[in-house]
Amino acid sequence: MIERWKQWARQLKGLVYALVYAYRDPRTPWYARVLAVCVVAYALSPIDLIPDPIPVLGYLDDLLLIPLGVALVVKLLPAGVWTDAQTQATRELRVSGPMARIAAGVIVVLWLGLALVAILLVRRMF
């Protein structure tokens, strides 16, 4: 059972990585790009709807929301874009591995920046 979950996690990783390529494709409409960015940011973000340390429920949101977000983006994409994105992602994952750590680092820096702005705003109010 754990092996199936690991395989499912690898598939999700590939789908999220394919979203990056779909986002970059010039044939992708703006609204699909916006949703793709939201799904990728949620997948890489250290902040979840339900914190991961909570048993079972912590990972349930990731296992439900990310595939639903990917499915919605795929429905919004023009024909052929998703196939091309998956092909590019598969090739990239085999050759050099994803840039997920860099992307996660960027998202963490963004969250820290937002937290700093919030702290500064609160300090000005009081």
Image (spheres, rainbow, N blue to C red):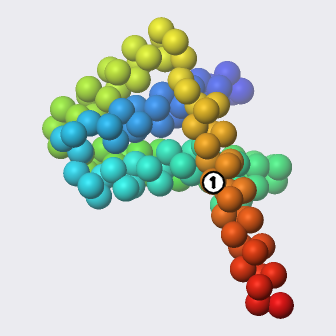
Q: Residue at x 76, y 49 (%)?
A: 52
Q: Quadrant of residue 57?
A: bottom right
Q: Quadrant of residue 90?
A: top left
The type of residue carrying mark 1 is Leu
Could one spot residue 63 in this view of the protein? no
Q: Is residue 66 left or right of residue 85?
A: right
Could you say where residue 9 lies in the image, as x and y percent from the top left? Answer: 60, 31
Against 118, is 29 above or below? above
Q: Quadrant of residue 81?
A: top left
Could you say where residue 3 lies in the image, as x and y percent from the top left? Answer: 67, 22
Say which quadrant the C terminus sits in: bottom right
Q: Residue at x 18, y 32 (%)?
A: 80
Against 112, is 93 above or below? above
Reading the image, the residue beneath label 1 is 110
Could one spot residue 106 in this view of the protein? yes
**Farthest residue, direction front:** 124
Say which quadrant the N terminus sits in: top right
Task: Tell which of 7 and 87 is nearer to you.
Answer: 87
